């Protein structure tokens, strides 16, 4: 019987007597496990010392007081003194309106003022003249009273003499007539003095009236001067012009928006809307790290300046009324104003109101402590080594 024997290849000579081969994973698993535990410890240490004290939000924007300028008077645009996006200083002329009509009104008001001043001067002369007439009337009254005293004495003496037969009846009657004339002269002088004094009161009242008209005319001059000054629209503060709507020769009305002035970068700030659950540890003066979305590599430093007195929902046009209908609790947000302090002018020059920002507030008691994970781990290690 033929038996087919199965031939098997002989094992390599090098493998004879060798042990089982180890995989690389078995060689690296313990070092990798140690590194993983070290990374976990460093991460946990960073979270305990730094991470849990950081409050961040991407609901933040660059803000600034933008002044939208409008004319106070109506007229045609005569000149535009600035270009779009031009930097201006406070008081610079931006837009000029035609001032011909307003100059004419100012001249008219000044003429009216001069007329009232001339009327006051005339009335003052009349007052002086009337006072002189009063003095003359008082002198005539004194003269009439003196004549009255003399005539009364003559009449008494004539009456005594005619009773004793020393004078004629005709002389007595003449003395009595002179006494009556003197009495009438006194009464006339008194009436004339009274009329003169009443005329003085009338002139004084006219003087007060003229002075009131003068003040009114002076106010009209000042108003016309202000209107003439309002033909030039000036920059209210240092800033950058934008959103110009005025066109040369355009007829504009009071309150029509013509141009806007945005604040310079150094007068801008950031408004970050944090959740109400993030606010318990917020304090003014805490440092803030800001990242501007428009410039990925730009990191700014700031500080917490103030918190809004109410949530943003209550400042909205239609604040919510939670006392009606079904209630759904929503976490509210509170605007927090963040100041940009100590930044270089080159960095601030890139900012524009309205840009989106990511803000991170450091609420730790010691904001100067290490912030990154490795520095925090080193600080923890030094603390342990320094411990007794």
Image (spheres, rainbow, N blue to C red):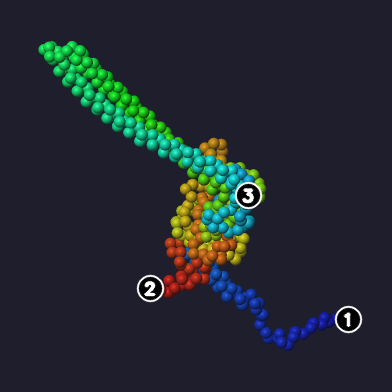
Q: Could one spot residue 10 in this view of the protein?
A: yes
131 over 2 or under it: above or below: above
Observer-nearest residue: 235 or 75?
A: 75
- Mark 2 sits on what residue? 388
Where's residue 180, x and y in %?
24, 17
Give me the residue at 54% from left, 36% from top. Answer: 324
Which element carries disc 3, helix, strand or loop? strand
Upstream in sequence: badge 3 or badge 1: 1
Q: Residues within 10 Å of mark 2 (few under 14, many from 20)?
A: few
Q: In the shown orientation, is residue 139 left or right of residue 356?
A: left
| Quarter placement of the N terminus | bottom right
Q: Residues within 10 Å of mark 1 (few under 14, many from 20)?
A: few
Question: Which dot marks residue 308?
Answer: none
- Mark 3 sits on what residue? 78
Residue contact between numbered discs 1 and 2, judged by CB atoms under 8 Å: no
Real-space Cα separation, disc 2 to disc 3, in angstroms = 83 Å
Where's residue 202, x and y in %?
38, 29
Residue contact between numbered discs 2 and 3, judged by CB atoms under 8 Å: no
76 over 348 or under it: above or below: above
- Mark 1 sits on what residue? 1
Residue contact between numbered discs 3 and 1, judged by CB atoms under 8 Å: no
62 over 168 or under it: above or below: below
Give me the residue at 49% from left, 64% from top. Answer: 342
Q: Which of pointers 1 and 2 indicates the residue nearer the eye?
A: 2
Observer-nearest residue: 79 or 21?
A: 79
């Amino acid at each position: 019987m033929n038996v087919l024997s199965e031939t098997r290849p002989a094992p390599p000579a090098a493998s004879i007597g060798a042990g089982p081969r180890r995989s690389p994973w078995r060689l690296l698993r313990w070092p990798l496990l140690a590194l993983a535990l070290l990374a976990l410890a460093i991460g946990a240490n960073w979270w305990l010392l730094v991470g849990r004290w950081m409050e961040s939000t991407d609901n933040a924007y660059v803000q600034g007081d933008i002044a939208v300028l409008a004319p106070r008077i109506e007229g045609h645009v005569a000149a535009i003194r600035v270009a779009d996006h031009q930097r201006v200083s406070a008081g610079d002329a931006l837009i000029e309106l035609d001032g011909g009509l307003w100059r004419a009104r100012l001249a008219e008001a000044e003429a009216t003022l001069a007329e009232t001043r001339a009327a006051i001067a005339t009335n003052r002369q009349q007052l002086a003249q009337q006072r002189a007439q009063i003095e003359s009337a008082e002198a005539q009254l004194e003269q009439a009273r003196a004549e009255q005293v003399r005539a009364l004495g003559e009449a008494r003496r004539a009456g005594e003499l005619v009773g004793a037969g020393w004078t004629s009846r005709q002389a007595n009657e003449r003395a009595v007539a002179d006494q009556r004339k003197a009495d009438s002269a006194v009464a006339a002088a008194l009436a004339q003095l009274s009329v003169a004094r009443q005329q003085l009161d009338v002139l004084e009242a006219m003087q007060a009236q003229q002075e009131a008209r003068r003040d009114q005319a002076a106010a009209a001059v000042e108003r016309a001067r202000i209107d003439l000054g309002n033909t030039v629209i000036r920059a209210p503060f240092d800033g950058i012009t934008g959103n110009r709507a005025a066109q040369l020769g355009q007829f504009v009305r009071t309150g029509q928006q013509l141009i806007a002035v945005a604040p310079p970068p150094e007068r801008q700030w950031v408004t970050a809307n944090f959740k109400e659950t993030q606010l318990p540890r917020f304090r003014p003066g805490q440092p803030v790290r800001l990242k501007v979305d428009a410039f990925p590599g730009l990191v700014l430093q700031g500080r917490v300046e103030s918190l809004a007195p109410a949530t943003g929902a209550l400042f909205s046009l239609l604040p919510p009324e939670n006392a009606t209908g079904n209630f759904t609790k929503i976490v509210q947000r509170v605007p927090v104003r963040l100041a940009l302090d100590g930044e270089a002018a080159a960095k601030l020059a890139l900012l524009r109101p309205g840009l989106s920002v990511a803000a991170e507030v450091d609420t730790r008691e010691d904001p100067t402590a290490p912030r990154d994970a490795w520095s925090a781990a080193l600080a923890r290690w030094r603390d342990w080594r320094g411990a007794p």
